[in-house]
Image: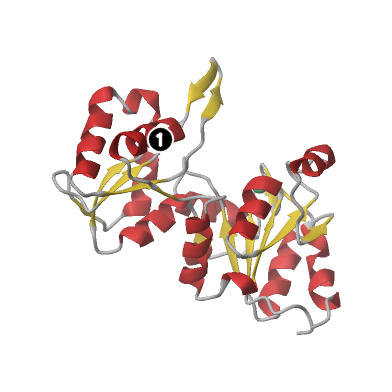
Amino acid sequence: MSGPHFEAILLDLDGVLYIGDKLIPGAREALTCISAAGMKVAGVTNTTTIARAQIIEKLHRLGLNIDEQHLFTPAALARQCIGEHSARLFVRDSLRQDFAGIRLDHEQPDYVVMGDIGGEGYTPETLRRIFLHIMDGSRLIALHKNRFWQKPDGLHLDLGCFVAAIEYATGKKAQIMGKPSTDFFHGICRALDVSPAHTLMIGDDIESDVAGAQRAGLHGMLVHTGKYRPAFAAASGISPDYELDSIALLPDFLQQRPD
Ligand SMILES: [Mg+2]
């Protein structure tokens, strides 16, 4: 291959390979080209509301060939972090299958995982339980740290507010899964056995995908599909290492770049 020395290419899913249920033209061919060039390819998404198996099902329905072990979600990486340790999970039921086989401990867990169980889930009693676990030495994992989100009746506090409350009370920092967390990108590189400096992240979100990857020492490529808006990208002050109109141009990019 004559392109740059990328050992792996990480792809954001929505906005890069598909939009909603519609495949972006050229996405299948781009995946084939990456594999044919001998590089590892992985999907990276921040989705925390459905299990990995359901995302894989969608990818396969669209003819996108990414296997389950190469699809990184916040839950999948949290599962990997926990490994053989014990954990107590505060995640929604639809996500529990991603934690299958984990050693659950509700008394003295090694890890506490905070996911999307909503404001109704994070009652003062639940927060106190988590607080006491962390004071007792449990380590805190948060599936993301978003500030707020939109529901039909308006804005609501998101998981990040509850995570911040625990961090503030305990003086300990949560390990944040999901983009743009450096821990997340490094965890993926470790799982793929590649170095960040030889890994390219491709996304349509200049902040979460591109800047997040760059801060973690990866290369960041912005595609002009999905949520990409020229004015927002220009105002962000972030300079992607590479930009393409769409993923369809990736095969040309990989072939044209000199060593
Ligand atoms: Mg996206």
Q: Give me the residue at 82% from left, 77% from top.
A: 255
Looking at the image, the residue that sits furthest to the front is 171
**Element class at badge 1:** helix
Residue found 25% across the figure and 30% down from its top: 126
Q: Work out which quarter of the rendered image holds the N terminus and state it.
A: bottom right
Residue 205 visible? The answer is no
Q: Is residue 257 left or right of residue 100?
A: right
Of the 4 image quadrants, the one containing the C terminus is bottom right
Q: Is residue 161 visible?
A: yes
Amino acid at dot 1: Ala
Figure coloring: secondary structure
Residue for badge 1: 164
Q: Which residue is the extreme one toward the top?
A: 153
**Compared with residue 62, is residue 186 higher up or lower down, i.e. above or below?**
below
Which residue reaches farthest left?
Answer: 107
Q: Is residue 104 left or right of residue 121?
A: left
| Percent coordinates x, y for residue 132 in the rendering | 20, 37
Give the mark count.
1
Residue at point 35%, 35% (across, down): 168
Measured along the vertical axis of the image, is residue 173 above or below residue 63?
A: above
Answer with left or right where residue 207 lies relative to residue 79: right
Instruction: Kindly identify the residue that appears in the image at 17 percent across and 44 percent down.
Output: 106
Instruction: Give the vertical position of 41 relative to 173 (above or below).
Output: below
| Residue 218 image point, x, y percent | 63, 65
Query: Is the CB atom of the residue marked by disc 1 within 8 angstroms of ligand 1's nearest atom?
Result: no
Find residue 230 and report its image quarter.
Answer: top right
Q: Position of residue 250 (x, y in %)?
A: 79, 66
Q: Residues within 10 Å of mark 1 (few under 14, many from 20)?
A: some
